[in-house]
Amino acid sequence: MGMTEQSAPSTPAGRAGLAALLAAPAEAVIALDFDGTLAPIVPDPEQARAHPEAVAVLSRLAPLVGAVVVVTGRPAAVAARYGGFAGVPGLEHLTVLGQYGAERWEAATGELTAPEPPAGVAAARAELPRVLERAGAHPGTWVEDKGRALGVHTRRTDAPGAALDLLREPLERLAATHGLMVEPGRYVLELRPPGVDKGAALTAFLTERPAVGAVLYAGDDLGDLPAYATVEKRRTDGRPGLLVCSGGTVAGEPQVGELADRADLLVPGPAGLVALLAELADRIGPAR
């Protein structure tokens, strides 16, 4: 039985990636963003939790594939906690790469690897309140401290887009002063060290597994583009992959446009992704 119309990739490369995943699931890697992909976007990121059916579906799918990896800008331990991944039978093949790969949590052991954050982040953290005040940040603007990165959110303001635009230049100056970069997202600007992104994290993870076959990557935001590029580069080298965009057709989030344009398959948010993963588990069959 083929995939449903909603879960059928729209591109030849995507169809080839899906076929390769189904043909050799034990060699496949399922890579997933967290916020907006496994977990619905909420006004307060501290209240984000994985879709209610996500853990059950992942515990079915993970034993069938080579690895499941969650790639996120959040601290790894936070993503593991908000995801509900600890101590779940069937998730022994799940890894969380947090802070864009700087941190790592293994579901099989509960082990967390988290090095000290770079000095530039601490310096920017100290100066950030004054920079926001001088810039006239809109009421409702708030800072999410991720340890190795700082996210400035405008989702709670009266005009999120205008509030974000107001802060781009002053935050870029602050970042440059301390050797950091600014990564834009959905009503957020994140200050973090350069050379650290989801593409580098995914590439390093795949390098540990030389026998990797198909790679599925699912994301929802501009920060997922480097991971898309990793899969696209693998495809130019003849290695199959499938790019999934979560929420690509949701109104009011135009920043997702480029991701949706490059995706092989659009799903309607975390619920759609969970349905896709469940369908894959059904297609692949019993755990090996």
Image (spheres, rainbow, N blue to C red):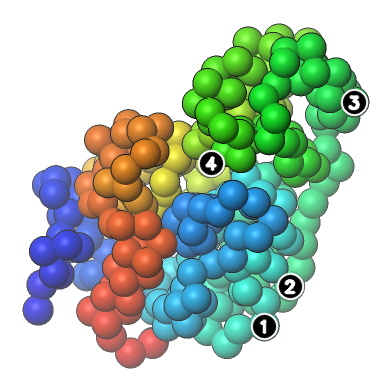
Amino acid type indicated by mark 4 = Lys
Amino acid type indicated by mark 3 = Ala
Q: Is residue 202 left or right of residue 228?
A: right
Query: Relative to the observer, which residue lies in front, 132 or 84?
Result: 132
Q: In this rendering, which labeled residue sits more in front, label 3 or label 2?
A: 3
Q: Which residue is mark 4?
A: 198
Q: Residues within 10 Å of mark 4 (few under 14, many from 20)?
A: many
Residue 113 higher or lower than 139, as above or below: below
Q: Which residue is mark 2?
A: 110
Q: Which mark is residue 126?
A: 3
- Image quarter (top left, top right, bottom left or bottom right) of the C terminus: bottom left
Q: Which residue is mark 1?
A: 87
Location of residue 100 in the rendering, given as x and y in whole percent from the top left corner: 62, 43
Question: For numbered disc 2, what is the local secondary structure?
Answer: loop
Query: Relative to the observer, which residue lies in front, 253 or 238?
Result: 253
Q: CA distance from mark 3 to mark 4?
A: 26 Å
